[in-house]
Amino acid sequence: MKMGKDPDYRFSLANERTFLAWIRTALAFLASAVGVDLLLREHPVGAMRHGQWLVITLALVAILTGGWAFLRWYQNEKAMRLEAPFRYSHSLSLLTCVMFGLGALVIALVL
């Protein structure tokens, strides 16, 4: 990305660390999807059929989180280079709602 002027390297590195934190979160969702899939394979066919939605949902959240990480990194880097204000992100509240919903559904399935 070569537009505007180079930002202070400390801010650019902080932006990169934030990106990597989001990528770790995406990897955790993906690892959870793989783990749930492996556990479902150990149970009867009925449990597997009803639990596949959880694996698919976790994998989709992982994909979206990884994509969102890149988008936020790019937007922040561009704003720093152009000395523009940062855009407010609703991603944290959205991710919190997704986690709350998934957690509630897993608890309902276990009980």
Image (spheres, helix red, strand yellow):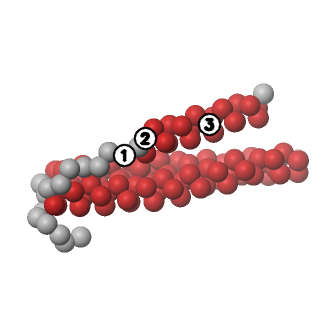
Q: Which residue is mark 2?
A: 92
Q: Name the front one of labels 1 and 2.
A: 1
Residue 89's tag is 1
Spot occupied by residue 13 in the image (x, y as percentages of width and height): 23, 53
Q: CA distance from mark 1 to mark 2?
A: 7 Å
For image coordinates 31% across by 61% down, the residue present is 74
Q: Name the secondary structure under disc 2.
A: helix
Residue 82, how many percent across, how many down? 16, 61
- Label 1 neighbour load within 10 Å: few <14, some 14-19, many 20+: few
Task: Tell me what residue is drawn at x 13 percent, y 66 percent.
Answer: 4
Front-most of residues 103 and 94: 94
Disc 3 from disc 2: Cα separation: 14 Å
Which kind of residue does numbered mark 3 sit on?
Answer: Gly
Q: Can you tell which mark lies on residue 13?
A: none
Q: Secondary structure at mark 1?
A: loop
x and y percent of residue 81 in the render?
A: 16, 61
At x 41% / y 43%, what residue is drawn? Answer: 90
Q: Residue 105's x, y, as percent?
A: 69, 36
Q: Choose the circle earlier in sequence order: 1 or 3.
A: 1
| Above-or-below relation of 78 to 58 | below
- The mark closer to the camera, 1 or 3, is 1
Q: Is residue 50 left or right of residue 15?
A: right
Q: Are marks 1 and 2 in contact (CB under 8 Å)?
A: yes
Q: Quadrant of the N terminus?
A: bottom left
Q: Residue at x 54, y 53 (%)?
A: 62
- Residue under label 3: 101
Secondary structure beneath dot 3 equals helix
Visible residue check, residue 94: yes
